[in-house]
Image (cartoon, helix red, strand yellow):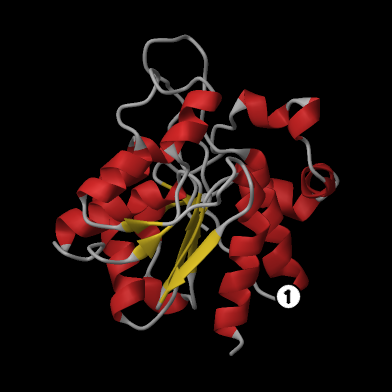
């Protein structure tokens, strides 16, 4: 699982980072299915967590489970530096969201190459919410990579509803459309939606994190 190291928003003193539930929901889907997980970030160590995702109204069962899980919390505090990760050592890669990936993972060359290494080796790539921003660098390194692919992302409407439209460098839905992706989302904002296009599995928003992980597990076990 590749997590963001970025926490600064634009035009505000508020912080961002990883949306905690988008990490914990998939994490426990994978753990409960018997998978081993390696965590990595561009800078290594503890990733920044969006304070909004720790508010009571956003706390999920998986968040509470995480708070009692010494093994998971230790791994979270000591994530690997991304540049040490080799796709050959893993079966799949998963990118949780939070706004952070819009900055660092979207422009991280190692991350972009890692996505291509997984994909071009026939291994699945999954991402949820703002996690698909990591596909931007993969597209830059391999032009046409994202063109025509069915993708789901955090929408422009959802961005406006959470009042972050003026605090991000670009709107992810717009950016992905510009790169040629076919965007598919739920009819109602903040409802779960998952898209699968070959080896690429993407989810729309926080509620889609668990279902995206389940779709990846289904793919791995078919």
> How far from the left and from the top, in percent, is residue 83?
34, 55
> How far from the left and from the top, in percent, is residue 94?
50, 61
Residue visible at 13% across and 61% down in the picture: 143
Q: How many marks?
A: 1
Q: In this view, does 103 lie to the left or right of 144?
A: right
Query: Residue lying farthest front?
Result: 187
Placement of the C terminus among the 4 image quadrants: bottom right
- The answer to whether residue 110 is visible is no
Residue visible at 86% across and 46% down in the picture: 68
Q: Is residue 133 left or right of residue 21?
A: left
> How far from the left and from the top, in percent, is residue 102?
37, 37
Residue visible at 38% across and 72% down in the picture: 87
> How far from the left and from the top, in percent, is residue 52?
65, 25
Would you place residue 213 above or below residue 88 in this image? above
Query: Residue lying farthest bottom?
Result: 222
Would you place residue 126 above or below residue 110 in this image? below
Q: In this view, does 193 lie to the left or right of 138?
A: right
Between 71 and 204, the residue placed more toward the observer is 204
Q: Is residue 74 left or right of residue 18?
A: right
**To which residue does mark 1 refer?**
33
Between 90 and 218, the residue placed more toward the observer is 218
- The answer to whether residue 176 is visible is yes
- Callout 1: SS: loop
Q: Crowding near pointer 1: few (<14 within 10 Å), some, many (20+)?
A: few
């Amino acid at each position: 699982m590749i997590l963001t190291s970025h926490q600064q928003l634009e035009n505000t003193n508020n912080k961002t980072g990883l949306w905690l539930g988008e990490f914990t929901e998939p994490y426990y889907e994978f753990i409960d299915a018997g998978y081993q997980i390696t965590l990595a970030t561009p800078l290594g160590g503890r990733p920044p967590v969006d304070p909004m995702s720790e508010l009571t109204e956003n706390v999920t069962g998986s968040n509470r489970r995480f708070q009692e899980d010494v093994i998971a919390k230790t791994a979270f505090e000591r994530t690997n530096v991304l540049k040490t990760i080799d796709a050959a050592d893993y079966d799949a890669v998963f990118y949780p969201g939070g706004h952070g990936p819009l900055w660092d993972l979207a422009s991280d060359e190692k991350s972009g190459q890692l996505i291509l290494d997984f994909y071009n080796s026939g291994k699945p790539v999954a991402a949820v919410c703002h996690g698909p921003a990591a596909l931007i660098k993969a597209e830059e390194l391999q032009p046409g990579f994202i063109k025509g692919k069915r993708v789901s992302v955090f929408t422009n409407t959802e961005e406006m509803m959470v009042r972050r439209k003026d605090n991000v460098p670009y709107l992810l839905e717009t950016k992905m459309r510009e790169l040629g992706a076919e965007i598919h989302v739920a009819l109602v904002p903040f409802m779960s939606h998952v898209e699968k296009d070959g080896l690429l599995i993407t989810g729309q928003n926080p509620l889609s994190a668990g279902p995206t992980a389940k779709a990846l597990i289904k793919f791995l076990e078919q």
